[in-house]
Image (cartoon, rainbow, N blue to C red):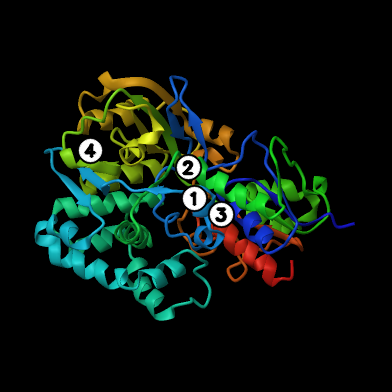
Amino acid sequence: MIEYDAVVVGAGPNGLTAAARLASRGRRVLVLERAPAIGGGARTEPFRTGPAVYDVCSAAHPFGAFSTAFSALGLQRYGLEWCHPRLPLAHPFDDGSAAVLQRDVAPTAAGFGLDRDPYRALVEPFLARWPALAEGLLGPLLRVPPHPFVMARFGLTGLRSAESLVRRFSEPATRGLFAGLAAHSYLPLDRLFTGGLGLSLGLAAHAVGWPVAGGGSQAISDALAAVIGAHGGEIVTGHEVRTLYELPPARATLLDVTPHQFVSLAGGRLPNGRARRFWRWRYGAAAFKADYLLSGPVPWTNEQCRQAGTVHLGGRFEDIASAERATVSGTMADRPFTLVVQPSVADPSRAPAGQHVVWAYSHVPNGDGADRSPQLEGQLDRFAPGWRDLVVERRVRTALDLQAYNPNNVGGDIAGGSLGRTQLVVRPWAPLHPYRTPIKGVWLCSASTPPGAGAHGMCGWHAAGDVLDAGG
């Protein structure tokens, strides 16, 4: 007897989005989550000291703010609020200056000196077609795109490496800023597509900003859960699924897991040849994560950094490129690329009056279990001397701690798998049907599927759409 139309394993943003889309279409849905609380990559927890809170994984949400899934599900009716800092992004340098990415292109370009016109020539044509471009970027790349001419034009630029793309710029500030954007790929900056990944993040900052979720990233998960509940869906936490055989009968099963977990869950139901293909899935560089509660704002040397929601630490393009090469090769740079989010700059509710929350991670080799605080905090010392005097509480997670927190973070890879070689395009195995698995009635909906990492829910949205198209 069929008990459910769909069973979803995993209550991260993608699993919850898949469940919400199916439930809103009248399907009877059950969500099973191993952790005691929902959220996965979009969870918020309290500090031990006082009522301040920090985001466990994702913090700033440039693509979440434009997610067509979140818009269609009406998450803002269920309590989700986007909080925007005055400046989306700042990138400081050792001389006390900083490159700044503002919402408006004109003042951003004006700050780039000789690169003013080249910068505008790069971003303005794409920004003019942003809704169409974002729709293409937030879906499978190997398909007939909804806006083929826009995507074709972007592809001619986006397939290039960051190293190649920045040759149009002469100012160190512009080049360094772009290096920080491209480093979100967790790849060496001479790899193909790193230019496009950096460009897409920059465009998102101009188009929708880099906001945080009011109250914490948990608000995204809670809003999705509210949609599921409003349409009669069920969510069960503290329920670990070890094999597909444990699941109740359903017309469709959606798995918010990476390829290696899928093989384990499938057991003997997956043909050996297909199992080997999923086992060949490669995981990328990892993160070392630190969260701080401070008694005041970060004393950045550059004043504009104090107004930015996100701050990239790494300096010049060459320095970041060198650090990313070291990370991917399995060593740790003394000055790793470090991403800092200051959520309380945009959302004062995160901490008591006068206090501030700082969220930070550095790129580290996959599987790294060491405490990399000296390297991460060295980058903060470099650009915000005196910040240590403000620390009220400090919490850190190594790459292996991130894996223990969420098995999808294999070796500390929070992106669901490397974007290198063909894995940006072929995610995870069937180019034309990236969400379906070789097992009939079973779909993948994790960040290992298109469009990849980020708390935007689009992987789950597209997977659920495929289920509906298949009659599920």
Q: Where is the C terminus found, in terms of image quarters?
A: bottom right
Q: Amino acid at mark 4?
A: Arg
Q: Quadrant of the N terminus?
A: bottom right
Is there any visible trace of residue 427 in the rendered image?
A: no
Q: Secondary structure at mark 3?
A: loop
Local packing at callout 4 (Cα closer than 10 Å; few below 14, some 14-19, many 20+) is: many
Quickly name the residue at label 2.
Answer: 217
Between discs 3 and 2, the one toward the N terminus: 2
Q: Amino acid at mark 1?
A: Ala
Mark-to-mark CA distance, 4 and 3: 35 Å
Callout 1 secondary element = loop
Q: Quadrant of residue 349?
A: top left
Give the mark toward the camera: 2 or 1: 2
Tell me which numbered mark, 1 or 4, is placed earlier along the sequence.
4
Front position among marks 4 and 3: 4
Residue 431 image-quadrant placement: bottom right
Height in image: 454 above or below 124? above
Describe residue 45's horizontal placement relative to residue 177 as left or right: right
Distance from disc 1 to disc 3, alpha carbons, whole Å, reads: 13 Å
Q: Within 10 angstroms of label 2, few (less than 14), some, or many (20 or more) residues? A: many
Q: Position of residue 298 (x, y in %)?
A: 25, 30
Please tell me which of labels 4 and 2 falls first in the chain.
2
Q: What x and y, as percent, mark residue 94?
A: 15, 37
Residue lying furthest bottom: 149
Outermost front residue: 77
Q: Is residue 239 visible?
A: yes
Marks 2/1 in contact by CB < 8 Å: the verdict is yes
Residue 455 is marked as: 1
Q: Which residue is mark 4?
A: 306
Out of 278 and 117, give the one closest to the viewer. Answer: 117
- Return the residue at label 3: 448
Separation (CA) of disc 2 from disc 1: 9 Å
